[in-house]
Image: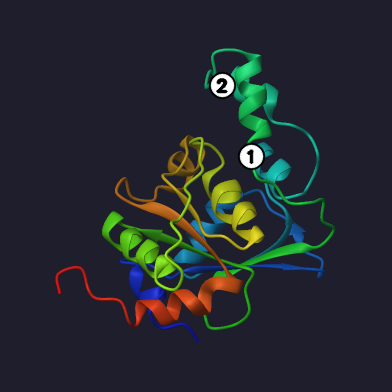
Amino acid sequence: MLRYIPGLMDKGSPVSVLFSREIGSDSPLLYCEMIQKARYGESFQVRAQDCKVGAYVLGENGTSPEDYYFDSGRYKDRHAAKRAVSSLHRLEKRTGSMKMTPYTGRDFNILILFLKPDSAMRFIQAYTWARGDPVEIKTGGIASVCSDCTAYPMQGKPGISLGCKGSRKHTGYADEEVVVGIPFVIAGEIEEALGKIPGTFE
């Protein structure tokens, strides 16, 4: 049971994301919407969600969101939109479901947190505690919850994102919050470090 990591959040609970072979339903909600609702107590087990970008990133289908991004006006031309899509981290096609719940101590693949900058700083310091390796933040300001903080951490590294238009528009997390994705494989190390590193004003 993690103790220090949940304490980094000011509001709500960290969200446990677990990929399962169990069958789930199709949801009319976006992935990031379900994550935000799980933060405040709801639980979901779904095969698919209702975001085109999320479907591509989370392994629901292989349909590129290049046209969607270009048509939205986010990029100068199709070349820029194509490069942006090619930079997205994504999961292999999957046949099972995603289970999203408030963290209760049970198994997870990824733990998603919403942190204020000072807490995000402590998380980064905890990550660097054992080896001194800095956290690499790689984000294009798109697909923040699904790509930056779910698919990327599945590689065993933490994901930190300033958010994206879609997640901020549809879920309403605070302007001053950033999104963090922690893979299970490093959660114990982060937890240990948070119990040992000095406080900000010590």
Near-viewer residue (180 or 123): 123
The three-letter amino acid code for the residue at tag 2 is: Ser
Image location of residue 156, percent across then percent down = 62, 63
Tell me where residue 16 sits by quadrant: bottom right
Instruction: Give the CA separation, mark 1 to mark 2.
Output: 17 Å
Q: Is residue 128 above or below residue 93?
A: below
Q: Name the residue under label 1.
A: 88
Image location of residue 52, percent across then percent down = 68, 37
Q: In this view, does 99 lie above or below 34?
A: below
Q: Marks 1 and 2: CB-CB under 8 Å?
A: no
Q: Mark 2 points at which residue?
A: 72
Image location of residue 26, percent across then percent down = 74, 54
Which residue does the image show at 64% across and 53% down from the upper left? 151
Which residue does the image show at 46% across and 61% down from the upper left? 133
Quarter occupied by the C terminus? bottom left
Image location of residue 164, percent across then percent down = 47, 39
Residue 185 seen anywhere in this rendered image of the structure: yes
Left or right: 202 with respect to 129?
Answer: left
The local crowd at label 1, few if under 14, some if 14 to 19, many if 20 or more residues have their Cα within 10 Å, is many
Tell me where residue 132 sits by quadrant: bottom left
Mark 1 or mark 2: whose residue is earlier in sequence? 2
Toward the right, the furthest residue is 95
